[in-house]
Image (cartoon, rainbow, N blue to C red):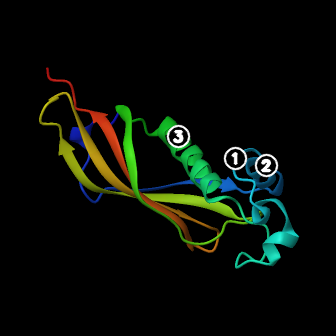
Amino acid sequence: MQYLDDLSVGDRASFGRYEVTREEVLDFARKYDPQPFHLSDEAAAQTHFGQLAASGWHTCAMTMAMLVEHMKTNPQASLGAAGTDELRWLKPVHPGDVLRCETEILEIRPSQSRPDMGSIRSQMTTFNQKDEPVLRFVALALLRRRPQG
C-alpha cells in the first residue's frame, strides 16, 4: 500500500492496455454523447475526424478503467479525488485503437488542516498504439498519510 509519504514529485508509471471496439464506441455514444460523428461513419467522414470517433468522455472512461485496473496491483491509500484540471482531447480515438497510460506526479501537498491526509497533482496522458497522445489531464487525488507508530 502506497501512502502520500511514499510518493515523490517526478514519480512515473506506465500501465494499461485497452482495445477500443466499434460496438463500445457506438454503445457509449448512444447512451451519453449521441453526436452524429460518434454514431456513424458517414457523419464522421464529413468532419475532421474522418471516420467514426469515440466520444472524448468515453476516452476519459477508458482511461479511468485502466487506472482502476492498475490500482488493483499497485494500491494506494486513496481517499478519492478532488477534481481534474487542464483536460484536453488531443487526437481522436477510433475503433481498433489500443490505448495505454502514463502518469507523473507534479506536486505533493500534505493537508494543513487534516494531518492524516494530503493531495497529489499528477498528469495523466493516454496514448494510442502509435504512441501519439490522445488525452491529457491533471488530476488532484487525495491520499492518506502513513499511520504513525
Q: Nearer the viewer, residue 42 or 119?
A: 42
**Quadrant (top left/top right/bottom left/bottom right) for the C terminus:** top left
| Residue at 67% in and 66% down | 93
Q: Which mark is residue 32?
A: 1
Q: Nearer the viewer, residue 142 or 147?
A: 142
- Estimate how packed mark 1 is, as few (under 14), some (14 to 19) or many (20 or more) residues with alpha carbons within 10 Å: few
Please state if 29 lies on the left or on the right of 125 as rendered.
right
**Quadrant (top left/top right/bottom left/bottom right) for the N terminus:** top left
Quarter holding residue 115:
top left
> Under tag 2, what secondary structure?
helix
Q: What residue is shown with label 3?
A: 68
Distance from Cα at disc 2 to Cα at disc 3: 24 Å
Q: Picture coordinates of residue 29 (x, y %)?
A: 75, 52
- Amino acid at circle 1: Tyr
Q: Earlier in the sequence, mark 1 or mark 3?
A: 1
Quarter holding residue 10:
bottom left
* Contact flag, marks 1 and 2 (Cβ < 8 Å): no
Query: Can you tell which of label 2 and label 3 is closer to the viewer?
Result: 2
- Estimate how packed mark 2 is, as few (under 14), some (14 to 19) or many (20 or more) residues with alpha carbons within 10 Å: some
| Residue at 51% in and 46% down | 67
